[in-house]
Image (cartoon, rainbow, N blue to C red):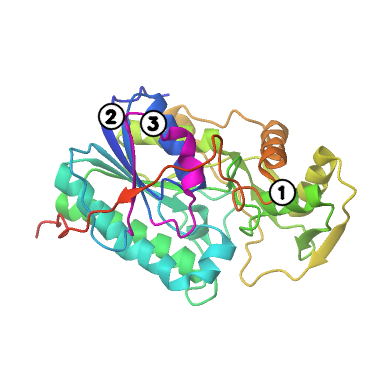
Amino acid sequence: MAPAPRWEHAVVTGGSGFVGSHLCAALLADGTDVTCVDDFSTGRPANVAELRDHDGFRLVEADVREPFAVDRPVDLVLHFASPASPADYLRLPLHTLETGSLGTRNALALAHAHGARFVLASTSEVYGDPEEHPQSERYWGRVNPVGPRSVYDEAKRFGEALTAATARARGTDTLIVRLFNTYGPRMRGLDGRAVPTFVRQALAGEPLTVTGDGRQTRSLCYVSDTVRGVLAAAAHGMRGPVNIGNPAEITMLELARWIARLTGSPSRIRFVERPVDDPAVRCPDITLARDKLQWRPLVDAEQGLRRTIEWFRTAGADGADAFHGPGGEAPAPTSGRRADPPGLPG
């Protein structure tokens, strides 16, 4: 894997979210100061509670849909702000679209003003319901632009287009990472994604609700592997897009049965209606990440699921929906500074 540069100061938008909070912790552990920017629409201050006493950590409450500034030099901007679960982006459709468009513009402006490396957290959802399997970065996708899922899919596709255009037109140092299904501690039990939903239901003894016939597949990557891949790509200097995910594929019915077994739950399977535009398959081709970054997932599914289940047992069945973190009170965010946008030249 490429050696990581010594980033001095990183800004992580959406840093109190599930993946963002793990990213903040990893950066701090590597000696990088971190400014976490979040509006807490879906993230939780409790997710970064354990970071509150770190001298290099600052939590700022701000909405990235509005221009924002940072009052010290920045050399890395990681744009992870966005509702990312079905429950969130269907509840916040306009917020999701604006975060992917206006929020990406403002995060790019910050990176450009500081001469910083910019990383866009995109998603496997840009591939839609794919006709190519597994999905490589060369595949352009098959997305319904007006369906209920389009608010997330198209927000990320636009974010990719804006990031690529900014790199070409203004020379900003950018990277696009396409994250496939990621799971692990700090997920919210009610966020609508398969792993936390099945774990919450299994621990509560409720039926595990599998959509459709359960034969649709996903590829699950444990959060520490996802974070390691993102930081490796950031260090490499590539522009991407690059897939970060686990190519081990599993059906949703198999996943539900596996979680029931690992939790020791008596829960039965209950089949429910499949969501509109739900992809039939999802599996990354990680050839690019493996060859260029020497990256591959290290945590196998059973190990990752056991860790996740144990976290939910400790946090409560609802996970981060009800969890306030170790040590009690979450850190109080500082007020976000509203400022004129740093501005993209031209």
Q: Residue furthest bottom?
A: 146
Per the rendering, the mark at residue 317 is 1
Residue at label 2? 7
**Can you give x and y, in whole percent of width and height, for residue 158 in the image?**
36, 63
Task: Please report the residue visible at 86 percent of the width from the left and 45 percent of the height from the top.
Answer: 265
- Of the residues under marks 2 and 1, which one precedes in the sequence? 2
The one nearer the camera, 194 or 64, is: 64
Crowd rating for badge 2 (residues with CA inside 10 Å; few <14, some 14–19, many 20+): some
- Of the residues under marks 1 and 3, which one precedes in the sequence? 3
Vertical placement of residue 231 versus 68, above or below: above
Task: Please report the residue visible at 34 percent of the width from the left and 24 percent of the height from the top.
Answer: 31
Q: Nearer the viewer, mark 2 or mark 1?
A: 1
Task: Please report the residue visible at 67 percent of the width from the left and 50 percent of the height from the top.
Answer: 196
> Mark 2 belongs to which amino acid?
Trp
Magenta-span inclusion, residue 58: yes
Vertical placement of residue 140 versus 4, above or below: below
The one nearer the camera, 229 or 340, is: 340
* Quadrant of res 194: bottom right
What residue range appears in magenta? 39-63
